[in-house]
Image: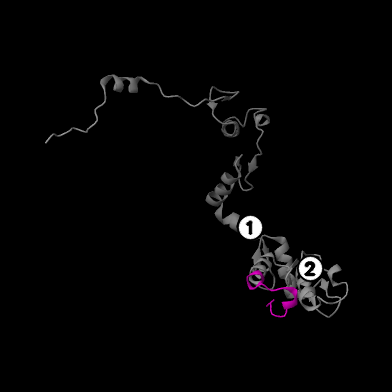
Amino acid sequence: MFEFDVSYKKDPEEEESAVSTPQVKPKKPFACTFCELKFTQKSHLASHFLNNHKDIPGAEDLISNKIHSCKYCDYRTINCHNLASHKLSKHKNKHQKSTKSLHCMYCNYSTNNKGNFILHSRRHTNVKFYDCQYCERSCYQKSNLDAHYLFKHRFEPEVENLITSKVYRCELCEFMTLNKTKHGRHITQCCIKGFSRQDSDKCKN
């Protein structure tokens, strides 16, 4: 039986060639105006200006990126994600308190979204701005009133002129909805069952 040595040994010349081959360094075309540092990306140069030469007159004029400033300290950055991380790590308590600055006077609800806060407050004060033209129903939001028109007064004359939301209709039956997901689910069921408008009474809306 012959035995073969399958282990690989590098040629000495090959090893010498591998060692002597210089590594290609990445190009750094963006040079600092105030020092000898160079950078591979323009954003890195902008951060360098902001962090190391901010006291030099005219340094910030060389920054084309938007500068994001912390409202709690002097920290500034051109990266919005860095600013968010800074607030959470350095000003966690202040940041959490400021993001929930709107507090309900009737319950423990709080939010930083003014629109959501107004809608919530109306539930306590019974303020409803959208009244139905056919009955005594009133709603906090126009989309809720549109849904009411669609399901309670869909056969009233000119009711479609009162609905401002987009209405999704089934071409096989009388089904209508304001919800795109529900419309897609209904269409799938209707098509599978092979209903037509004549079979609309068999189709479950």
Q: How crowded is mark 2: few (under 14 residues within 10 Å), some or many (20 or more)?
A: some
Looking at the image, which is closer to me, 13 or 3? Answer: 3
Q: Where is residue 32 in the image (x, y as percent from the top left)?
A: 58, 25
Identified at 69% across, 64% down, the residue is 180
- Let me know if residue 2 is in the magenta part: no
Marks 2/1: CA distance?
27 Å
Q: Residue 33 appears in which quarter of the rendering?
A: top right
* Residue at screen point 63% across, 70% down: 192
Span of residues in magenta: 190-205
Say what amino acid the circle numbered 1 marks: Thr
Position of residue 7 in the picture relative to residue 140 (left or right)? left
Q: Name the residue under label 2.
A: 142
**Can residue 127 be seen?**
no
- Number of marks in picture: 2
The quarter of the picture where the N terminus appears is top left
**Residue on which the image places disc 1:** 99
Residue 31 image offset from top left, x and y in percent:
57, 24
Residue 70: percent from the left, percent from the top? 62, 45
Percent from the top left, x then y, of residue 108?
A: 63, 71
Secondary element under disc 2, as helix, strand or loop, is helix
Colour scheme of the picture:
one colour
Q: In the picture provided, is 187 more to the left or to the right than 45? A: right
Q: Please identify the residue farthest to the right as the structure is shown.
A: 157
Q: Give the mark nearer the N terminus: 2 vs 1.
A: 1
Up/down of 32 relative to 152, above or below = above
**Amino acid residing under circle 2:** Lys
Above or below residue 31? Residue 119 is: below
